[in-house]
Image: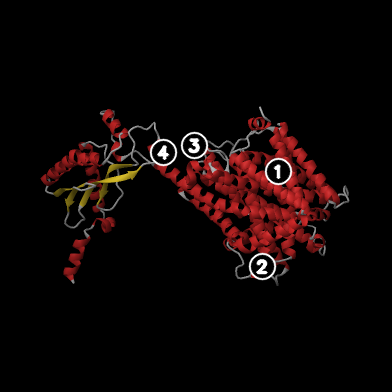
Amino acid sequence: MSVLQQLRATTTLKAPIFVPTVIFVILIATFCSIFPEQAQTTLNAIKQSVFANFSWFYILAGSIFFLFLMFLCVSSLGSIRLGADTDEPEFSFPSWIAMLFAAGMGIGLMYFGVAEPILHYLKPLRQGLSEAERMKDAMMMTFYHWGIHAWAIYAVIALALAYFGFRYKLPLTVRSGFYPLMKNRISGFGGHAIDVVALCSTIFGLTTTLGYGAMQVKAGFNNLGLLDSNSFGVLIMIVSVAMALAITSAISGVGRGVKILSEINLLLAGLLLVFVIIAGPTLLLFSGLTENLGYYFSSLLELSFRTFAYEPENQGWLSNWTILYWSWWASWAPFVGMFIAKISKGRTIREFILGVLFVPSLFNILWMTSFGESAIWIDQQTNGALAAISNNTEALLFGFFDQLPFSIIASVVALMVISIFFVTSADSGIFVLNCIASQGEEKAPKWQTILWGILLAVLGLSLLYSGGLASLQTMTLIIALPFMAIMIALCFGLWKGLMVDSQYSSKTFSQGSASWTSGDWKTRLEKIVNPTNRKDIRRFLTKIARPAFNELVEEFESHGLTAQMNFINGKNPKIEFEVIKENLRNFLYGIECQSRELSDLVVEDSNVPNIEESKIYEPITYFFDGRQGYDVQYMTKDELIADVLKQYERFMNLAMDDSHDLMTADVENIGESTGSGQ
């Protein structure tokens, strides 16, 4: 067996997804490593082009995701379950909520918890504001970037993965969400292209996050005096050690140990949060949280669509903050989405959306309020101690702790939290990359895990070398653009799937089969398995419907009522039973021959006999009031008579109630009466 054959036998990777992705990543890493200055210039030019031409698209897409999810939540589709109708949630509600809290935590909150509010405060978007207004605006901008819109981007991917994975039993990959639009073509080139973009987006999203982590770990070591160097070699050491730990964790099978480590890390982060609330301006934090939440939610609609189209001087701020954030969230969506999807089986869509949109968002807002508002307050009390180091963003968290009691302990704990998040994020990220590149396969050979770890490390270091965090952000921005377009299309696929699901689930027995008994079941089976044509419908109308209607005419006339039967012969024949009224509309029960297209799956299925044409014909009822009719081909003469009487009884009950006279009154007679009285 050749080396290539051995490799194919021991891998879960799918070449049409893996090969284009790796080629793209290697080209980027090589270009940035060998030609760092040219790479930085090229990436900056592309970034400015994206900002100039597509900022509006990022804003619109983020708002579409939010509105789409809210519509699903309040509609009847929200009651659809992520899984079979009988599936119960795998985790209890408190456990599920706790895991959503965990999903909201990460390196980003540690990096930006102090940095973003301080930077917004020091460089306000609006000029001429008071100190209080600057503080309030800074917190609202931070809430906007870390709140509901961020989680709407995650939730769209997570909902599609969970719905099509657990309801349709498809692999947990992005392409599965396009099944309603592409059907079996998701297994072809189009599906591969979708997963390639998702894979590249996830890779660059991970490298951006790991870049933030590496920069902040280095700043933490410098702050604690453990390192006194800003050389690139320190970053190489940090990334290499962290990635080695992540790879070791991923291939060693110590999943339980990593889970325990993650839980300890969340506990440490929670203790940091409590410490900041107690050590900081506690009363201001709680009062500010309440007011800032009101300000955020009252401004949410305006924020959702703000592109500064008429304020070009502010478009640079939009690009360097909101657009970069939206691209970052989009690039992380497959990663976070897969985690959320895996823990949400058995939940209803409504419960899922409310939980995913609001639980992590509120936690993020609490975190940002505690760290950000405390930092602004400290900066005010110390005459700009944090403002003095605002250009060194990754050091702001540790500078913030320097102004609080027990600063060394707090900084050490923060450094531990960041380091553990670094390792666990890389570990989980490698798992997701393997899953996407393998079309949903969760178990992968060890060499694949090592390969992904090396690729992430090399790519991250290459981009950091060519232009620091700006290069990482730019690549995330670029690759997130096509992925945002894919997510828009994913919403259409999800909508179509949900509508088909709703119609399928609400489909009841046909009217003609409602009264079936075991008698004459062979005849009924023969009608079911043999598709009907025009001749069959004509035979039904002449052999079943005409005798039934003639019998009804005689019986109605015996009771002093005027009734008639009309048979309209033609290409699509129809027959009508009509009861003539004077002041009411005439009661009409008609049956007409209608055609219906068959599913290609049925026509092409060799195991479904007697179906060769793509169209069948059915006798469908229609009524005087335009209501949608139903198929009556399985009814006998007596059953058809009974159905006509049911409809007539309904008609008379409605006619006896004045509240229905707009529908039941004879409009022509009313017009004549009105005319004669003028």
Q: Nearer the viewer, mark 4 or mark 2?
A: 4
Give the Cα distance between marks 2 and 1: 34 Å
Q: Nearer the viewer, mark 4 or mark 3?
A: 4
In the rendered image of this protein, does residue 89 appear above or below residue 518? below
| Of the pair 147 and 205, the residue shown nearer to us | 205
> Label 3: few (<14), some or many (≥20) within 10 Å?
some
Question: Can residue 595 be seen in this snapshot?
Answer: yes
What coloring was used for the rendering?
A: secondary structure
| Of the pair 157 and 302, the residue shown nearer to us | 157
Q: Is residue 404 left or right of residue 523?
A: right
- According to the picture, the residue beneath numbered tag 4 turns out to be 601
**CB of mark 2 within 8 Å of CB of mark 3?**
no
The amino acid beneath tag 4 is Leu
| Of the pair 365 and 438, the residue shown nearer to us | 438
Q: Earlier in the sequence, mark 4 or mark 3?
A: 3
- According to the picture, the residue beneath numbered tag 2 turns out to be 314
Q: Nearer the viewer, mark 2 or mark 3?
A: 2
Give the Cα distance between marks 2 and 3: 49 Å
In the rendered image of this protein, does residue 444 appear above or below residue 585? above
Q: Earlier in the sequence, mark 4 or mark 1?
A: 1
Give the Cα distance between marks 4 and 2: 54 Å
Q: Position of residue 602 (x, y in %)?
A: 39, 37
In the rendered image of this protein, does residue 97 appear above or below residue 281? above
Q: Quadrant of the C terminus?
A: bottom left
SS for dot 1? helix
The amino acid beneath tag 2 is Asn
SS for dot 3? loop
**For residue 84, which numbered disc appears in the image?**
3
- According to the picture, the residue beneath numbered tag 1 turns out to be 425
**CB of mark 4 within 8 Å of CB of mark 3?**
no
Q: Earlier in the sequence, mark 2 or mark 1?
A: 2
Q: Nearer the viewer, mark 4 or mark 1?
A: 4
